[in-house]
Amino acid sequence: MQEFVEEYGKIWGNLPPNWRARGRDLALDILSAGMDATIGFNTYLAKPRIQFLYIHHVFKDEEKQLENLLKILSSKHTFISYSEAWTRLLEGNIDKPYIAFSSDDGLKNNLKAAAILKEYGASACFFVCPAIVGEKDFNKIKAFSADRLHFPPVEFMDWNDVLHLQNTGHEIGSHTMSHINVAKTPHDILLQEIQDSKRILDVKCGNTIHFAYPYGRHFHFSSAGRKMVFAQGFLSCASAERGCHIVPSGGIEDKEQLLIRRDHVILDWPINHISYFLSRNVMKADIKNNFFPEYADSHPDK
Ligand SMILES: [Zn+2]
């Protein structure tokens, strides 16, 4: 019998330690940030910059929290599309505080996220894995959820859902074919994963330019992987490394050196925690954070 997870509250206690640890790490980060609390969030959040935020899911018990978050963020930021954020980075055109949203893995409840975002004048780029889009075999879904996402079985979008997102003003990007760890994948399989995802998404959705690698930390990626992503025709590459973007006035000349940083948000985090890590990003903002590690220290714009 198929039993998909529908409420975040029901799975929280059953998640593997690496998921639970994210909340704890965040709390420790906050304690160690050394932020000047007397300045307050408002001062930090008023800084012109681009902040990317991404989610994985909006289960039924998270819908209200997403609305609250958007309400609060919209009072201090202008929401822009993922492509506009990327273009502004390349052009060095950041005149106020901006936020761009994305979502990874293509869960079915992303449809609800998309609808709520639209209510607040926002859009998102949804990074999907074509191998699981429209999968109906529960055992395959269960295995994919457990092995690739470290999550209980969740329902995924089908191609009609993906096209619906696109038709309602959202964007679609690649998250590899089957959610692989780029750093641990042999060259020929990696090439296939990136190439096939580009080919399939181009056919289904039209030219697909954005890519986000699974798991998202520096150590889940590689210089060879980055070269392959751009060689296969993607124009942007995103991580899940935290941080906001400030850029030199001339912008970023070589788009292949641009590391898009995104902050992961779990919607049941208290809003103060989210404000705190966004503020901490402002405190640590640095032009060299725009670049992949192999370029960061030597870049002339630094
Ligand atoms: Zn993912």
Image (cartoon, grey):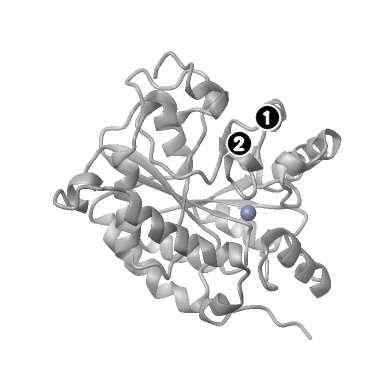
Quarter of the image for residue 269 reads: bottom left
Locate residue 93: give its quadrant.
top left
Q: Determine the quadrant in which ligand 1 lies.
A: bottom right
Distance CA(mark 1)–CA(mark 2):
7 Å
Contact, mark 1 vs mark 2 (Cβ under 8 Å): yes
Neighbour tally class for label 1: few under 14, some 14-19, many 20 plus, Cα within 10 Å: some
| Above or below: residue 68 compared with residue 250 | below
Q: Neighbour class for label 2 at 10 Å: few (<14), some, many (≥20)?
A: many
Decide which of 138, 184 is in the foreground and name it. Answer: 184
The residue beneath circle 2 is 209
Residue on which disc 1 sits: 233
Q: Kindly tell me whether mark 2's CB lies below 8 Å from ligand 1.
A: no
Q: State the image coordinates of residue 143 (x, y, percent, origin top left).
A: 79, 67
- The answer to whether one can see residue 183 in this image is yes
Residue lying at the far left of the rendered structure: 38
Q: Is residue 110 visible?
A: no
The answer to whether 156 is drawn above or below residue 44 in the figure is below
Quadrant that contains the C terminus: top left
Where does the N terminus fall, quadrant-wise? bottom right
Residue 295 spot, x, y in % from top left: 53, 21
Q: Nearer the viewer, residue 21 or 257?
A: 21
Q: Secondary structure at mark 1?
A: loop
Which residue: 62% across, 64% down?
A: 107
Q: Residue at x 17, y 52 (%)?
A: 40
* Amino acid type, callout 2: Ile
Identity of the amino acid at label 1?
Answer: Gly
